[in-house]
Image (cartoon, coloured by chain):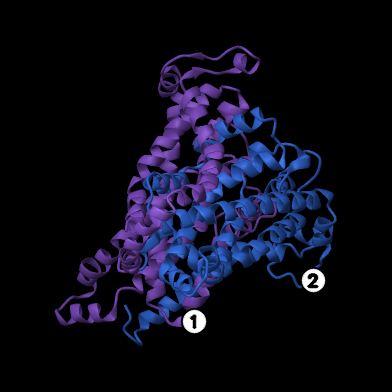
Chain colours: A purple, B blue
């Protein structure tokens, strides 16, 4: 965390001057932040207020056609929380998030450790490949993977069929829900590993050789080196990366919606994002959809709290 | 791990090459398939290297009226969102990094929190708002949402750059006779240029690639952005078989500019997202 030190230093030395400025330009910071605040208020603030408000109102098809929405207290929430389908989607989403995030972290850390222990040229080759995968726009990722797993001409089925005793000719990967989510998880892992691997690698390069040598002189072997030196130094970044993966793997609307478009639609292929979309825009149950969105928001904010605290620390003078 | 000449290093190097090939394979496959003719690509044996490649797919895509309309829509939306976002975020970043004022903590907290929110947490409400304004399928409607989406991240990133230019420099210029504005324009602003470019590229990537919000705010064929057009282009329909060569050519056209921009700024991306934690 030494990197934040210079920032802190400048903040400390400029503090008196800022105080002087504060007197002379008391209204300037407000003028400067008004545009950003307005943009946020319109694009985020107003919808948020609408959503909180309407999650407590009956707002369905009748209200779409002019009937006045009525307040129903927590009825939308209780309707959701007693609905087996909502629970099924919620559990699927959380399981999807946990599995995908764990796979991403394990693969990412593995790749980072590998990159630290190999000569320069294979490392650079690996880094370039990872960057290419990371840079792919989501829609292009999905079209390419859909082509890879195409039932008729896809290279995946072709290669698997070459294995002895395996015949995947014409196999459609997107029909069985387990296989559908497996494919989604694989694609998201493929796309998210680069960020984790490169970040952990950057962290590993910060473990200085002096520290390692000192530990070696004191008799630390490979395992205790990992446990006592490397892991403690990497801990903060690993925690943040895991949290970001949790948050990002909960928000997979685009990938799921695209895969459904390529394969099959239907409730059994839904995760939270597509489920809320279906409830609201699809069926017109805006009140219930707002309540479901509020639940997703609360989970996200709870998950991101630690991350937000770390970011705030970076900001503090 | 770093001991020299251990045979493990060579096994590791081999493994790294295999993994590098595996990770890059989908990208390679996209580009390679995009050069295959319709006849070649529908063979049951895949063509691994496009020796007899053609540019027909690219010609087809580039003359597709939907592609050109979507490209235009994407350019307009991105240009508007980017110009507004950079201006607003830059002013906001100046406020939070150069001044201590009442309400600053709340603003910073809001900026960080909003970045965490998934589209799913708000898109129903944003859809209702934009449809209430009568702005579905319009540049203005989607721009309002995009600006709110990218301002926080851009502001947070610029905050770091502004804090990196010592206020002393500005003060020195003022002692030498510059006005406050002059000092800012002549000293601080040029030093911030690289930061503005980097933040601009990020905002560009976010808006250019955005799919979830576009898919619910822009539902008519006439108002599609590139990601939406690519989705429809790649989706199976009852009318015709998917032309995989063309789909891959379209995907390549959408992806290549993004990949280039991304490679230019990715170092800062890693640093920005994980903050001080990366640097140990």
Which residue is labeled 1 in the image? A121
| Number of numbered callouts drawn | 2
Where is residue B212 drawn, in percent x and y?
60, 43
Q: At 44% across and 53% down in the image, what residue appears?
A: A25
Query: In the rendered view, would you say A266 is above or below A283?
Result: below
- Residue A130 shows in the view: no
User: Badge 2: how crowded within 10 Å, few (<14), some, or many (20+)?
Assistant: few
Q: Secondary structure at mark 1?
A: helix
Marking on residue B52? 2
| Residue extending farthest bottom | B5
Determine the secondary structure under disc 2.
loop
| Quadrant in the picture for the C terminus of chain A | bottom left
Q: Residues within 10 Å of mark 1 (few under 14, many from 20)?
A: few
Give residue A14's quadrant in the image: bottom left
> Label 1 is found on which chain of the structure?
A
Q: Please give left or right for residue B272 compared with residue A313 in the image.
A: right
* Separation of marks 1 and 2 at Cα, in angstroms: 31 Å
As drawn, the residue found furthest toward the front would be B177
Residue plotted at (42% across, 59% down): B98
Q: Depth check: give the residue in front, B175 or A98.
A: B175
Q: Position of residue A159 (x, y in %)?
A: 60, 60
């Amino acid at each position: 965390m030494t990197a934040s030190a210079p920032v802190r230093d400048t903040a400390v030395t400029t503090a008196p001057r800022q105080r002087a400025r504060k007197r002379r330009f008391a209204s300037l910071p407000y003028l400067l932040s008004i545009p950003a605040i307005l943009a946020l208020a319109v694009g985020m603030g107003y919808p948020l207020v609408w959503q909180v408000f309407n999650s407590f109102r009956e707002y369905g098809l009748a209200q779409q056609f002019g009937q006045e929405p009525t307040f129903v207290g927590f009825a939308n929430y209780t309707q959701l929380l007693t609905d087996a389908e909502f629970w099924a989607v919620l559990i699927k989403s959380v399981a999807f998030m946990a599995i995908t995030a764990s796979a991403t972290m394990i693969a990412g850390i593995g790749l980072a450790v590998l990159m630290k222990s190999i000569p320069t040229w294979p490392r650079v080759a690996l880094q370039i490949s990872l960057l290419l995968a990371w840079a792919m726009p989501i829609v292009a990722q999905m079209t390419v993977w859909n082509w890879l797993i195409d039932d008729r001409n896809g290279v995946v089925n072709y290669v698997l069929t070459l294995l002895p005793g395996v015949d995947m000719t014409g196999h459609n990967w997107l029909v069985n829900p387990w296989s559908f989510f497996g494919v989604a998880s694989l694609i998201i892992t493929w796309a998210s590993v680069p960020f984790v691997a490169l970040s952990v690698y950057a962290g590993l390069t910060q473990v200085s050789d002096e520290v390692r040598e000192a530990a070696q002189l004191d008799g630390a072997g490979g395992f205790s080196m990992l446990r006592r030196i490397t892991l403690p130094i990497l801990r903060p970044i690993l925690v943040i990366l895991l949290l970001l993966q949790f948050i990002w793997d909960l928000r997979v609307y685009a990938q799921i919606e695209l895969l459904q478009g390529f394969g099959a639609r239907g409730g059994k292929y839904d995760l939270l994002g597509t489920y809320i979309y279906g409830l609201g825009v699809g069926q017109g149950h805006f009140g219930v959809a707002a309540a479901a969105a509020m639940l997703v928001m609360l989970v996200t904010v709870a998950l991101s709290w630690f991350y937000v605290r770390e970011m705030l620390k970076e900001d503090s003078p | 791990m770093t001991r020299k000449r251990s045979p493990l290093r060579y096994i590791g190097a081999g493994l790294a090459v295999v993994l590098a090939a595996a990770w890059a394979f989908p990208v390679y496959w996209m580009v390679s398939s995009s050069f295959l003719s319709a006849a070649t690509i529908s063979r049951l044996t895949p063509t691994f290297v496009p020796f007899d490649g053609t540019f027909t797919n690219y010609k087809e895509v580039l003359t597709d009226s939907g592609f050109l309309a979507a490209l235009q829509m994407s350019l307009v939306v991105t240009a508007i969102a980017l110009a507004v976002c950079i201006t607003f975020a830059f002013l906001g970043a100046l406020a939070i990094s150069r001044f201590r004022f009442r309400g600053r903590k709340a603003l910073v907290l809001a900026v960080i929190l909003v970045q965490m929110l998934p589209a799913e947490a708000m898109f129903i409400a944003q859809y209702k708002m934009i449809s209430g304004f009568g702005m579905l399928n319009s540049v203005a409607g989607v721009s309002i949402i995009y600006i709110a989406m990218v301002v926080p991240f851009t502001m947070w990133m610029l905050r770091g750059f502004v804090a990196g230019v010592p206020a002393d420099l500005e003060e020195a210029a003022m002692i030498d006779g510059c006005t406050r504005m002059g000092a800012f324009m002549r000293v601080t602003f040029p030093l911030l240029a690289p930061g503005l470019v980097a933040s601009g590229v990020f905002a560009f990537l976010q808006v250019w690639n955005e799919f979830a919000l576009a898919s619910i705010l822009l539902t008519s064929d006439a108002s599609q952005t590139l990601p939406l057009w690519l989705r429809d282009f790649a989706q199976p329909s009852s009318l015709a078989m998917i032309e995989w060569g063309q789909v891959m050519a379209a995907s390549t056209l959408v992806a290549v500019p993004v990949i280039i921009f991304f490679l230019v700024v990715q170092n800062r991306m890693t640093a920005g997202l994980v903050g001080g934690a990366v640097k140990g």
